[in-house]
Structures are given as structure tokens and as C-alpha cells.
Image: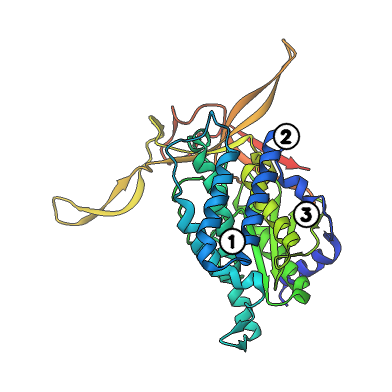
Amino acid sequence: MDAQEQEAARLVGSHLVRNVPSIINAALPRNPDKRETAARLSAIIAELLEELLNIPEAEAEAAIRRALDAIRELVPQETRDANANLSPLNAISGCFAEFEAWLDGTWTQLGGRQVSDIKLEARLYRLFPKFVMFIAHCINAYFYYNGTIRALTNERQCRIVVPFGKTDTKPTDSDNRGRVDIGLKLVKPKMPFVRPQTITNAAMFAIAEAKAYAIDHVLAFNQLFRYSRPLYERQPDRRFLWGLTVCGEDTYVCLFMPSKAYATSAMNVQTPEGCRALINFFVGWSLCEWDRCGYDPSMVLRSIVPRLRRNPIPMAGPSTSETASGSQQPVRHMQDKLTYYEIQVHNYDPESQEHTTRQYFANLPMVNADRLFSRHTRCFSGSFTDPSLRCGYDGRVIATSLLKTGWP
């Protein structure tokens, strides 16, 4: 064990609270109407899965069509897109065929022979993402039929959870040698949606760590704790984390809060109850408010082309040009885009005694959060001047002050 593995094992022993059924409430929408829609959508998906497991393959298409009709009925008549057809049909059918063995218990056999432990875990790298994709296609169908939701611009308003294409791999922005089994990302609903490939800590919503057997759940939690920590460092707007472990047929959802991590009891996907419980989380994450996914709604990442720059200090670029003497000289380039955070900060006017908010424009953090538990702190440099009107030549916000954030 290296130092990071030892720390993760220690934190699992001291900070993990198990068998907490109320975790699902943190993933469901606050809005009563949305919560009711989430419950009905979860029920449709769970019933479809159960039906597909118990009917002949020839009847699968009819079952999926009935489920899609039921999903369409969830959309209010006034916002329903009359032009939407059954485009998700083939995608849903194709996904089910690729993870059916995980639900019916035959996934441990291959050609009538027992699969080795190492290969069993590797099979989960394929089976679980296909299960997630099945749920994603069903949820995407709901958004697809809802003309109003389809017109929304980003995943802060509505989203689907999809797995990265690459599994058992090191995130490209990671500083250590650890390999994430399965990474999950939030993407904007669209038809068809694109499954991202390359895993990065900056883009991950949650990590799922897999083990071949249910008895290995402690080892899975150790890895989940270890690999979830960099998400705080790479995501300046992250306030808490979600994570999953997949141990054979048993799946756990974990909620990382500043003081403790809380885990569900085992959700066995080979039972209707376990499957439904897991589906509830994915539907909840898709319909809930942005902050319930663990993000700070007061922070928005912007990327723009500024109109005016100050301090015209050239930046060295890779290109070259010839001078009159024939020698090669580097061509100087300006950065084309400015990436910054727009943060709503509390403002108090002593004269009017009014509490309002102001827009603070910040560069990426100077000091970042780098721990799973205890107090988290980040420090940004920036100003209250809109950088889209005036910024530095180096493509950064012209800093006039520092902003420190801390929680809890």
C-alpha cells in the first residue's frame, strides 16, 4: 500500500457511514411536480427492464414502444413535441442486449465455463456502463418528447448521466498513477447524444469502482475514496461529491459530505427492488436542481473572446517567420479565448442597508480544495470588472482583489 491507499483505507474506516436509505432524498428534485415526474419515470424504466427480462426477444420491440408511449404521456400536453418520433427505440433495444446477462445472473459464465476473477471485474467495466446507457436513453426520450426542455441550453437546467467510453484508465489530468474503473459525466440532453471518451477529473460527475464479488465492497470503497479526492481539486465549483461501487451484482451509492460519507445498503440489480432503487438515483440526478448534483449554482464557467486587452506583452508561439536576413524568428500570438468564473457574491450597502449580490469575475483558483473531508477552501484572483470588455493581454482577468471561499 502506498500513502494514498493507506489514507483512503483509514478514511473508509473512520468517515464512512453505511446503510443510510435517506441518501436518495438528496438526489431527488425539491420541486414536488418534478419529484412526482421522477418517481413515475423511474417506475416506467424499472418495469420495462423487468418485462424485457421475462418476455421472448421477439416481443421486446413492442414492450419498448409501450414504455416510450408511457414516457411521452409524462410530458404535459402543452409542452409536448408533436414532431418527436420513436428515435430512442433502437438505442434502448441495443443497450439491453449488452447488459442482460448482468441482471439474469449469467454474466459469470462464458461459453458454459466460469470466468476468472480478473475477467469478471473487466466484464463489469462493460456491463455497468451499458446499464447506465440504457437508463440514459430512456431519460433522454423524456427530454426528447418535451419541446421546452429540449430548448434549454446546458446541463445546469436538465441533464443525463452517461459513462465515459474509456474504462480502467488514468484520467488525463491526474497527477498520480491511479486508474479509474468507470467515470460518469453529466451531458446536455439531445438526440442522439454523444458518449464522451477520454476521462478527466475536471469533467467527471462521479466515479464508479468495480469489484468481481460482493464481499470485496470494502476494497471498492477504498478505491472510490482515493480516486474521488482529485475531483475537488479539478472542479472549482464542486461542493460535494457522489460516487458508486459495483461489487458483483451489488451496487452502492455514496454521498461525500464535508464531515462524513454516507452509503446506501446494497442494491442488488438481480432483484426488481434493487434495480428500481438504483434507477431512482440516475433519474433523480437528471431532473434535480443543479446544486443537488454537488455543484455551486452561484458559479458559472465562461469562455469568451475579449474585445479589449491591456498590457500588450507578446506571448511566444510555436510558429516561425523569416526575417530579411533569412533567419527564423518566433511569431507572437495573443490567446484567443478568455476562460474565467462568473461568481455571484453577497454585497451589503451600509447606506441603504440592503443585501444584494454582485458579479465577481475570477481566474481559475490560486489555491484549490484538495481533501475529501473537513473544511474546504479555495482562493480566486479577479475583479468586479467584466472581462468581456477589458482583460489582460495574456487572456486572464485583470485581478484587483482576492476572493476566498470556504465550506462548510
Residue drawn at x 48%, y 31% is: 387
Q: Residue 183 — which label?
A: 1
Question: Please, which colouring scheme is shown?
Answer: rainbow
Residue 206 visible at all: yes
Report whether 327 appears left or right of 262: left
Q: Position of residue 54 (x, y in %)?
A: 63, 66
Return the residue at label 3.
Answer: 373
Relative horizontal placement of residue 234, taking residue 14 as reference (left or right) = left
SS at circle 1? strand
> Which circle's residue, 2 or 3, is located before the other in the chain?
2
- For the residues bearing labels 2 and 3, Cβ distance under 8 angstroms: no
Amino acid identity at mark 2: Pro
Residue 97 in the image, given as x and y percentages of width and height: 53, 68
Of residues 397 and 187, which is closer to you in this image? 187
Residue position for label 2: 32
C-alpha separation, residue under disc 1 versus residue under disc 3: 21 Å
Please say whether residue 172 is visible from this viewpoint. Answer: no
Report the Cα–Cα distance between label 2 and label 3. Answer: 31 Å
